[in-house]
Amino acid sequence: MNTSERRDRSVSLLVSLAVFLVGLLSLGVTTSAHAGALIMTCEGTDSATFTPGLTDTQQNISYAAAVSLSCPLGGVGAPAGLNSGAASSVSLLAMSCDTLATGPFPLPATYTWNNGSQTVVEFELVEGAIVDGSIVLSFTGSVTSGLGQGSLVDATVTLPNVQGILSGCTGSGLTSLSGPTTVTFLGL
């Protein structure tokens, strides 16, 4: 094999390897060597309660959230068989209906997985928007301890029926919200 043929073959192998790696990444597989990396996407429901109810006046609110997740594909860095979990979060926040979608406020969450392991995430609301009659909240955070420590996390919660939410802010206030959520652990 002459030099030109070897170079062409090397380029061909490198291109094939690059295509293979891009294919793996599109399937959610990573080549990260960090032992703590956790890469997976989970979907479920996020339910929150507010005491006292949210009104148009900012006040200290006891906020409690419960999240139920399904992670049908498992994930890179996740123990075999990990496919679901639940999270809880309790905070005392200065909030009103006006700040519900604007924050900023930290939201700690502890995920307990179906295999008994835990992941603690510190979230921050980064954006709230009204999309197709729903309030869409986007959070970002990092895993501070447990499974996937150091991994980055994105979460989206969609709260349907913005008009119903706004009308709930009158009188004694909005006491609960619920909607679909997607949580993505991004590794490092």
Image (cartoon, rainbow, N blue to C red):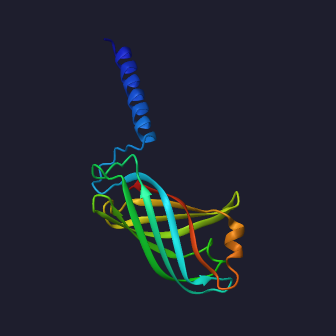
**Where is the C terminus found, in terms of image quarters?**
bottom left
Identify the residue at horizontal 44%, vertical 78% (top origin): 90
Image coordinates for residue 35, horizontal then vertical, percent = 27, 54
Q: Is 40 above or below relative to 89?
A: above
In the image, 110: left or right of 102? Answer: left
Q: Residue furthest top?
A: 1
97 vs 147: above or below: below
Location of residue 136 with respect to 21 vertically, above or below: below
Q: Position of residue 119 (x, y in %)?
A: 34, 65
Q: Nearer the viewer, residue 15 or 126?
A: 126
Along the viewing direction, whichever of 96 and 20 lies nearer the viewer: 96
Which corner quadrant holds the N terminus? top left
Q: Position of residue 159 (x, y in %)?
A: 61, 64
> Residue 20: x and y, percent?
40, 32
Identity of the residue drawn at 68% across and 83% down: 56
Quarter holding residue 138: bottom right
Left or right: 127 as drawn, with respect to 71: right
At x 41%, y 33%, the residue is 18
